[in-house]
């Protein structure tokens, strides 16, 4: 660094106090490349726990590239994706679950996801897992005594202790595992399908939602070619709108999305918004739509209330399939707020746990928790079969290992590399 950075107030970079910023020039062969600010983070109080510095230049492609070249020429290496966070993990500043939450926070598409990520980054999940592990360890100590000093005959007591501990740990893990359904919704968005017969107003509603200021929209390539999935965050609740491309492009009459397509889209949805043209009596096609949504979480929209209404909110045929019926005019922007309110209400239960509890959003964590529960059940079987205590101990160690994998105590290098390869550069 001393080779390329000349601070205004001359002092070697290592002597600069941590958490300070120095003004100076980046130079090459005595020539000034740019005027910069260098922030210095002294070990161990840095992101990676190592000595780090950041160069703030004026920016611009040429200058930045030049500074980067100079750094590389003078012994720096380019960081790999996620390298900073990986180093923070390998140096023990954060555990693996915390490191994984960094990527969740960066990639978050809604406020709820950020909240879940930050909670995990602050060690919420890690603390819970370490408490559970401690509970197991406390019993393990007695088991070790029983193994090492069989003459003390503590086996009976230990067996009872083991059963109580296993029950308690299993309950906690099941509770954690059950949060994954919500976690998945936070992470992947509530898969939402807008369906309805041609001309009911699907694309008009979609455009309303997407244009709305409060909806933060991100566009994604859909899983099949030619589809676009759009992420909207409505009052902080993430919705993933399925096949928005299909709805949008269906402008010409022939291409309009038909009932068959609606059925396909509805199959994979967590929430269906079924839209009806209320200025016309309920048609056979509408009845088919009602049939599609009857066993699903759905909101019924009666559109075009600016026209003469032929279908009303209190229609029994609607009421038996959904208890959430909203009247709107997509064209005139009437009633859209009510739709948002209903969506918020529909997922309000989840909201409570989003905000207060630890929510598992990562499938790796969920699988390990599940594996730990299986290991608990195997241990219970060894007890039922009156296996010797040292065999029981082996099974209990499996539970500890499953849990330890969450926080990264025993994970292999392959898994670590795979996790960090998903990071972006510079993180
Ligand atoms: P889709 O086939 O279901 O996507 O329906 P569109 O959104 O393309 O709408 C079909 C037609 O109904 C268009 O001419 C829209 O302008 C019209 N339309 C949509 N919403 C309303 C509404 O609330 N009131 C009235 N009067 N017309 C509407």
Image (spheres, helix red, strand yellow):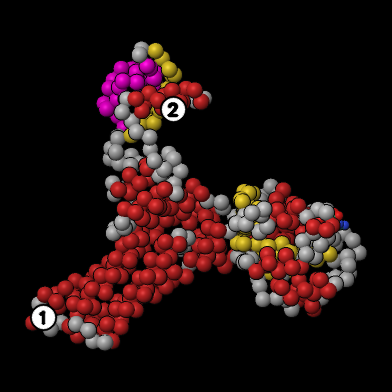
Q: CA distance from mark 2 to mark 1?
A: 66 Å
* Mark 1 beta carbon near ligand 1 (under 8 Å): no
Residue 135 lies in quadrant: bottom left
Residue designated by label 2 = 56
Horizontal side of 198 relative to 106 (left or right) equals: right
Residue 403 lies in quadrant: bottom left
Most extreme residue toward the right is 308
Q: Nearer the viewer, residue 7 or 253?
A: 253
Horizontal side of 106 relative to 409 (left or right) equals: right
The quadrant the N terminus occupies is top left
Residue 48 lies in quadrant: top left
Q: Position of residue 167 (x, y in %)?
A: 34, 78
Q: Is residue 85 above or below residue 398?
A: above
SS of the residue at dot 1?
helix
- Measuring 30% from the left and 17% from the top, which residue is drawn there? 10
Q: Which stretch appears magenta?
A: 1-28
Q: Position of residue 91 (x, y in %)?
A: 28, 46
SS of the residue at dot 2?
strand
Q: Is residue 226 visible?
A: yes
- Measuring 40% from the left and 70% from the top, which residue is drawn there? 370
Residue designated by label 1 = 150
- Measuring 70% from the left and 50% from the top, which residue is drawn there? 210
Q: Position of residue 269 (x, y in %)?
A: 64, 66
Q: Is residue 11 magenta?
A: yes
Tag 1 or tag 2, which sits nearer the N-term? 2
Most extreme residue toward the left is 151
């Amino acid at each position: 660094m001393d080779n390329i950075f000349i601070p205004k107030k001359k002092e070697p970079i290592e002597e600069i106090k941590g958490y300070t910023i120095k003004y100076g020039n980046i130079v090459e062969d005595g020539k000034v490349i740019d005027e910069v600010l260098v922030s210095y983070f002294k070990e161990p109080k840095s992101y990676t726990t190592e000595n780090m510095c950041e160069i703030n230049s004026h920016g611009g492609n040429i200058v930045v590239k030049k500074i980067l070249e100079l750094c590389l020429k003078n012994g720096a290496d380019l960081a790999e994706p996620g390298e900073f966070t990986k180093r923070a993990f390998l140096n023990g500043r954060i555990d693996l679950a915390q490191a994984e939450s960094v990527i969740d926070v960066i990639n978050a598409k809604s406020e709820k996801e950020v909240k879940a990520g930050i909670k995990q980054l602050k060690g919420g999940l890690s603390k819970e897992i370490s408490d559970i592990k401690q509970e197991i360890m406390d019993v393990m100590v007695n088991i070790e005594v029983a193994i090492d000093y069989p003459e003390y005959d503590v086996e009976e007591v230990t067996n009872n202790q083991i059963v109580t501990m296993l029950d308690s740990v299993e309950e906690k893990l099941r509770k954690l595992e059950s949060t994954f359904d919500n976690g998945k919704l936070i992470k992947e968005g509530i898969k939402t399908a807008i369906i309805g017969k041609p001309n009911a107003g699907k694309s008009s509603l979609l455009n309303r939602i997407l244009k709305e200021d409060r909806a933060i929209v991100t566009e994604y390539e859909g899983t099949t070619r030619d589809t676009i999935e759009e992420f909207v965050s409505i009052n902080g609740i993430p919705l993933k709108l399925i096949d928005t491309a299909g709805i949008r492009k269906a402008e010409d009459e022939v291409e309009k999305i038909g009932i068959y397509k609606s059925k396909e889209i509805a199959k994979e949805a967590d929430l269906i918004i079924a839209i009806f043209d209320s200025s016309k009596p309920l048609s056979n096609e509408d009845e088919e739509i009602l049939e599609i949504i009857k066993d699903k979480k759905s909101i019924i929209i009666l559109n075009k209330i600016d026209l003469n209404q032929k279908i009303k909110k209190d229609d029994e045929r609607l009421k038996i399939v959904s208890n959430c019926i909203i009247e709107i005019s997509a064209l005139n922007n009437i009633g859209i707020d009510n739709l948002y309110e209903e969506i918020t209400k529909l997922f309000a239960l989840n909201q409570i746990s989003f905000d207060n509890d630890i929510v598992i959003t990562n499938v790796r964590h969920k699988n390990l928790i599940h594996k730990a529960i299986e290991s608990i059940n195997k241990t219970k079987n060894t007890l039922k079969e009156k296996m010797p205590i040292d065999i029981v101990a082996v099974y209990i160690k499996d539970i500890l290992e499953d849990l330890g994998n969450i926080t990264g105590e025993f994970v292999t290098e392959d898994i670590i590399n795979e996790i960090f390869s998903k990071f972006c550069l510079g993180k």
